[in-house]
Amino acid sequence: MSTTFPTANPKWDLESIFEGGVESQAFSTEVQSLEKELGELNEALSSLKTRGDGPIGDEILSEWRDFFDRYFSIVARMSEAGSFSRAIASTHTDEPKALRMPSRLDDARTALGEVRVGLLVAFGGLDDEVFSKWVEDERFSDMTLWLRELRRDADRAMGREAESLAVELNRDGLHGWGRLYSELSGRLEVTVEIDGEKTSYSVAQAKNLLDSPERRTRRAAFEGLQQAWGEAAPVCASALNSIRGTEQTYFRRRGGDHLTKALDANRVQRSTVEAMMEAAAEFRPVLVRYLKAKAKWLGLETLDWYDLKAPMGAAEDASISYEDAQQFIVEQVAGFSPKIAEFCQTALSRQWVEAEDRSGKRQGGYCTSLPVSKEIRIFMTYGGTNSGVTTLAHELGHGYHGMVLADAPVSERRVPMGLAETASTFLEAIVEQAALKRASESQRLALLDDRLGRAATFLMNLPARYRLEIEMHQHRAEGTLHEELLRDVTREVFQAAYGEGLATVDELFWASKAHFFITGLPFYNFPYTFGYLFSRAVYERAMEADDDAVRQVDALLQDTGRLSSEDVAEKHLDADLSDPGFWKTAAGSLVEDVERFEALVAQ
């Protein structure tokens, strides 16, 4: 594994996880071992009890502790194997065998689901006195929140037979639709025609062209994407119809509504999301001012959708090399924390990042932690733009969060998505603030545009996605989600979100955004707004702190796996997340940023 920094190699190294890539025998052996051990774990669970004629004694509690140790060890290994298989599939969408790698874990996932069903049965209906034996026992102190959530889910469960059937059906039903979309979008080819010359790109490469300073290139890329997604739209609509329909069947039988699972998964209260959305809506007028000012600078009356990421200022003339991007991020982060900068340099130099700009890769970006190897891996397609630098910093922030939790118990490593966005967006803020301080006037315009563009994404686009998903559920409850309906609803929602700031919107956004097709976690949208605003509050607090700022940030990150979102905010920020005022204050500097941006445009 290379240790050169900055590295010129944009490909990640997966050999330290499982050797052999798509032909890895080590991976195959691990999958077989997991299947065998999960079968044994299920048998062990059947012999354990949580209730009986007499009190739950010390011997029974010790048996449960041993069981949980085995359970969480397998969970960690499943996560490692899943991350590896996803990494192979993400980077080789043109290889059928690679695309099938994640499905090789299907039997193990189903078996793990059966263990989960057994746990729901064991802990369902327990009275407070019996349940207290677990949460008050020191042996289970590392899983108090996890146990409380298990009991909550157990009391909502449909019953053993129905939950077991759901686990089996999800493999080829609900999750099958998600895999279909992943394979379809990964293989999609986008034809971009400029001056009569046609070039074929992957979706990720074509999306990078939307950052081009040439409007005709942006328009051609957008039209190519529209053509490609338009052809895929009927299949995408069918998949989405089935995914939303299955979700509705579950919440009708388990209780709650379309938001219940997302709220529980994010360890956040409905009142918090409502307060956050109320605050985000108040910034719409000032962000429309930003979009109008950008249109003016570009010589346009009003921006079109494909102009949103058009570069401005000095950055429009030069591509930022991958090496320069690495150096820039590490230098800026070091100004706040040499410790975090050292992590970033390690991740980059050890080839933990896949950033190659080529076809045969899936769209989007992500960071995944490897709980067994205690490493991380980052996937993205770096296109040499400010946006690409920001994305790299964002994903490195995720990676740092993962390393902070690397030695935490497995039961405390599941971080809700909203809090998971804290370190990532925090690192963005560090990089952009440092860059603004040393920028020339033209560079400052480019950096402010990038900063405000992200604000528009988090406070306009993502709330629109949230409303769109709600609309999907409302329409699905009344009938079928089909292409024409989804186009119409998407257009209405995004026109309302951007108002006079945009002349056109992407009516195929529902098809092109992979987040709507993630079957394990619905409403993969509002947590981004949460993370953006919450991290701004954390950043401001850290900037006001003394030399212990990094320690305070680390302490907050460590609590993200063992406290609810509201409890983390109260403990570390003395904040009430159900108060819209908290969220408004977190974004308060946007008004000043827009005023500075307007002044620079007017010069």
Image: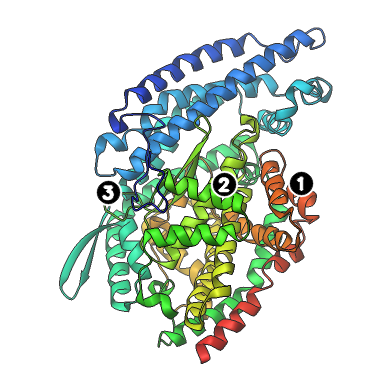
Give neighbour class at mark 2: few <14, some 14-19, many 20+ (Cα, 10 Å).
many
Discs 2/1, front: 2
Residue flagged by tag 1: what amino acid is it? Answer: Asp
Residue 49 versus residue 533: which sits nearer the camera? 533
Upstream in sequence: badge 2 or badge 1: 2
Circle 2 residue: 400
Under circle 2, the secondary element is helix
Under circle 1, the secondary element is helix
Residue flagged by tag 2: what amino acid is it? Answer: Tyr
Distance from disc 3 to disc 1, alpha carbons, whole Å, reads 43 Å
Give neighbour class at mark 1: few <14, some 14-19, many 20+ (Cα, 10 Å).
some
Discs 2/3, front: 2
Q: Which residue lies furthest to the front in this view?
A: 4
Circle 1 residue: 567
Quarter of the image that includes the N terminus: top left
Residue 590 in sight from this viewpoint? yes
Determine which of the numbered discs, if any, sits on residue 360 in the image: 3
Q: In this view, does 19 lie to the left or right of 339?
A: left
Compared to residue 578, the image places residue 4 above or below, namely above
Residue 463 in sight from this viewpoint? no
Q: Position of residue 326 (x, y in %)?
A: 44, 57
Q: Is residue 208 left or right of residue 600?
A: left
Distance from disc 2 to disc 3, alpha carbons, whole Å, reads 28 Å
Determine which of the numbered discs, if any, sits on residue 267 in the image: none
What's the residue at 41%, 28% (across, down)? 106
Residue flagged by tag 3: what amino acid is it? Answer: Gly
